[in-house]
Image (cartoon, coloured by chain):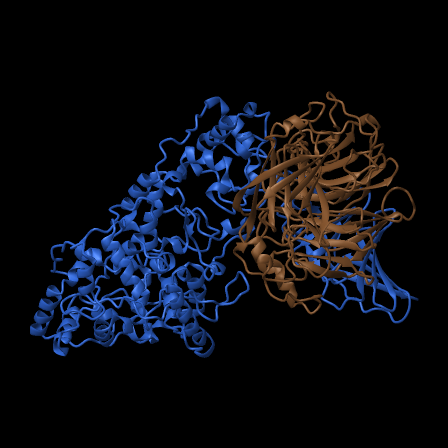
Chain colours: A blue, B brown
Amino acid sequence: MKGDRFNSVWSRIQPCLVLVSGCLALSGTVAAGPHVAGYERFHADALTVEGGAVLFSELGCASCHGGSAVVVPRQGPHLVDLASRVDREWVREFLKDPETGREGSTMPQMVHGLAAEEVDAVVTFLGSLGKGIKYRPERHANAERGSALYHEKGCIACHAPTPDFHPPHGDGKVVASPLAIPHPDLKKKTSLEALTLFLAAPSAYRPDGRMPHFPLDNQEALDIASHLMDFQASDPREAATVKQWPTGDPEKIAIGKEIVSRLNCASCHTIPGMKAAELVALSGDAATAMSHCLSEAPVAGLPHYRLDEGQRASLAVFLKGERPVADKDGKLTLAAMNCYACHDRDGIGGPTVETNPYFIGDEGIGDSGRLAPPLTGIGHKLRRDWMEDVFAGAEGSRVRPYVKTQMPVYPAHAAVLTEWLDRIDAKPDAIPLTERKEDLEAGRKLLGIHGGVNCITCHNWGEKKSLGIAALDMSSLDERLRPEWFRSYLINPAEYRAGTLMPPLWPGGQSMVPDVLGGDTDRQIAAIWSFIREGEGLPEGFPDRSSGIYELVPADRAVIQRTFLEGVGTKAILVGFPGGISLAYDGDKARPALIWRGGFFDAYQTWYSRHAPFEKPLSEEVYGFPESAAAGAFRGYRVDEAGNPTFLLRDGKRDLSESFSVADGRLIRVVRWTEGEAPAIVHPAGVAVEATAGEGILTSIYTWK
Amino acid sequence: MVVFAQDKPAYEVFELLTASSPNDSRSKEWKPGDGLALEVSGMEWIGPDRLAVSVRKGEVWFIDGALSKNREEIKYQLFASGLHEPLGLLRDGDDLLVAQRSEVTRLQDADKDGVADAYLTEADGWAVTGNYHAYTYGPKRDGKGNLWVTLNLGMGDLTDNSAGWHGWGGIIASDGKFSPQSLGMRSPSGLGANREGDMFFTDQQGTWVPATPVYHLRPGVFYGNQESLGSLKNPAAPFQLTSVPQANLPYPEALTTSPEFVPPAVWLPYNKMGRSGTDIQVIDQDGKFGPFDGQLLVGEFTNSAVNRVFLEKVEGEYQGACFPFLEKFPAAVVRLAFAPDGSLFVGMTNRGWSSLGNRSYGLSRVNFSGAAPFAIQEMRAKPDGFELLFTEAVDKDSLAKAFAMSSYTYEYSSAYGGDEIDTKTLEITKVLPSEDGLTVRLVVAGLRPGYVHELRTSGLKSDSGRALDFPNAYYTLNRLPK
């Protein structure tokens, strides 16, 4: 049923992509009816109590009736300052039919059965709330940067990507998710300044975290707003503001207030000076509900939802069934708040096929470097205080700087979410770690690479970069993790994070380093934990680069080493001559590329790093050869008695060669060819050139100026 | 005639050189010139007693006296240096071919002084983006004389994989260019031909690869890893896929969604057979290495082991069974090579990852003692079950409850690794030993083509009272023989 709906949605999105270039963001769901992503994704295909429970919460049913098991209750947006933030006509149209104001809105229609002047009174009353925003963006707007932020920060986890922004992963095709929560027509609804203000602090207007609070600075908020409003100018003061609302007639305001009070809008919205009515107990009779709030045709005085058949049936199942009183495994709350858009928990959720390609980060760490961590057992994994810090967005609570998608923050709900996860994920029978003071040094060894399990091969340690990929800093794990979780994670990482690059270092609980602490797995893990907690200094094995022990020093003959070299490429052949003159030859383009004096090359990364980077010469005094057409294809090199190279080229008709050697602090380059004209050769900057030509030979002597 | 002796191990291991500490080459005190960090990445015999070994830091060493059991008599000589992460070595006439990151290089020693004096470009033509994971393996020669090279996929920045031929295998064409032949590889770190000259390669568990597979390497097929599809846009692509296989289906079903998509000849189930397959080496030693001639040995990185693979052809395609074989090596097994005397040289390096053998590198020699292990020598598919050939007659009294079987497959998916799915216990309805006790026919109900069939034994004994060397075997039943 829902599948069909998605298919039809899909066929309607495609033309939008292709034809309507001005269509700013792809509109995900265009079918009528309220859109609750966590319901559509997990519950639309089968009628379940859980699906009904998610709808019951997210359509605001619980606001009037109570009885939701979702941990953070659904609320409507605050209505303060409406007149300076939202267009008056848009408000009126939205009240009359929320769906036309915003596709998929979960706001029920409330004003059916009211006369036009009564609706006008409601609008007038809403316009009287608050004094208006006083925010004028002073920065320069940059919609292009805003687009990058919108697609990188995680907005597209819930909202549709822009058709012209190609996902960095996968095949680069822009595919709209039918789950995407549509934006309203923002130009019609609001202004650049109001949207900026909203994006900088969504929680000030939407208290329930469904549009979560991202820690954006004002510039980022302005840029994203500029992108969403398609504001291409630079000076935000040029943007239209919300059209001034007429001053409301007090009598009309009073009438509007009375209607708003009667309709019990305050059960969902915070309205100054107005209280929600008493909760209305559910009859428990689905048939009654079907003829009231859930009826297909609007009933005067009751909210009217434009539910589709599946949604209505799900709610009926919920009303008839045994309704959950608490969210025991997280499935309801995570679906309601759409945490599943980014996170997997117990094998449910995580980015969809459509959104996954937009998640970016440090790809050297694999998917863990770009995707949000799974939430399976998160309340058991994290210390309570840390979890609360993460929800509250406390300073320093972001530990994966490489994941570009940012975790939003939930300051108002941090305590309740933390308490809840701590409770439902508790594992009282987890095996504790027993630390021993005397094992601290063994911890240093185990973390390191001299007889340890090589943690620092991949993991950073405080300020110290790992020897390879830049995986999560281990030095402060104790501030975040519970030791008993750490123990079971190390024994089988894949159980906690499918697809992690983290290898099982104690596979099946068996230690790979039998000579440390008698090969006792528990004791080894406890020792690592102890060192993380209170060890001083570093794990063993961070190389002392400054000692230069991997520096190649050509003593009595030339030294040749191939590597990836910055400014040259992936086929760089480095030649260090005795006396401090060095050359980099580009085997791809068959030409000398760089010369330098001073140190030759530090081979540590090339020889011993798994994650071999592009290297640099060991000198500040580097001169480049001008780019030139290759005289032929690279065919390798020969090495003479002194280690000096002769590079070999072929251009199809003839063979060429280039020899390099040094004498008296000068670099000597000899080009030879078998037939035809002399090849055009270029010389590096920074040296004086003394050239002599002969039959099939051209000698250039480079003297440093 | 194979000799059996209860108290004699079938295979004896001698360590020629092993890192003295788990991270010898990276110790604080180690510096260039301080002895040899033998992180073996390629091996080739080039004389009756001379082994050439490439090491990951970029050198080729000659080991003379390699067959001596006196370490004092084993001499190491540096032949070539300055190479860029060589991962394979092959003799070609008087020269050696070595795969570097960006080319296959011919190493020549024109003046015969034992040190290479020419490093000639033998083949290139694939993109090298600088991605650390984009390794180059090979070359290995097939029965027709083709030299095969395989190219690893990059990790991390996957857009790199759209550049020329990442995740492809190919041969070196006469113009010295890489000629792409087939695609869909992830980390094809081991290549090797069987006795018939057909080429095989291993891949490693990771994205799109649920467990170590052994594939028949040949032109025109797709091995499943979709990260390699980018190069199909290259005008030099030798063929196009009729369709891209559909993901998130059980493997046998996914195979039907693209005609070019082929299954491995053998799956090596994750953990049960190891975690990361490496080199392939055929046993062709006239019994000098035991009764397994014609079978393939497969190196195993994480478990520091060597596995054994038996292949047969069913309807013209290879399939077969894998068995654990040798284990407890001091470091990750990366390369395998037979010496002229029929002993097996096992080259190891742990670099970048960890293994059960926690030394950072090593070179060991395995000798067959002359006493075959009690093992399942061959496991063949039959229309109604399997036929097991043992290295020694079975004790028929131990057969009654000796066998159990289940079958499973994997999901074809982009995930990193994957669980066994759709596991079913199969009923073994008949156990029929031959008169001489060397073969046992198993009649099995509910065989599932396309599935791995896991055979577990318990309590099985040989006539002389020995237990099996390893109790389990895994047959990949791509096709049911008629």
Where B349 sits versus A244, above or below? Answer: above
Residue A552 place in picture, x, y as percent: 72, 43
User: Is residue A609 shown to the viewer in this render?
Assistant: no
**Quadrant in the picture for residue A569:** bottom right
Instruction: Give the camera-side residue of B216 and B93.
Output: B216
Residue B384 place in picture, x, y as percent: 64, 45
Residue displayed at 36% across by 38% down: A383
Residue displayed at 36% across by 41% down: A379
Would residue A276 appear left or right of B293 to someone viewing this image? left
Residue displayed at 70% across by 61% down: B220
Where A189 sits versus B314, above or below? Answer: below
Where A126 sits versus A526, above or below? Answer: below
Would residue B161 appear left or right of A577 to someone viewing this image? left
Instruction: Give the camera-side residue of A379 and A126.
Output: A379
Would residue B361 appear left or right of B63 to someone viewing this image? left
Instruction: Give the camera-side residue of A456 and B354.
Output: B354
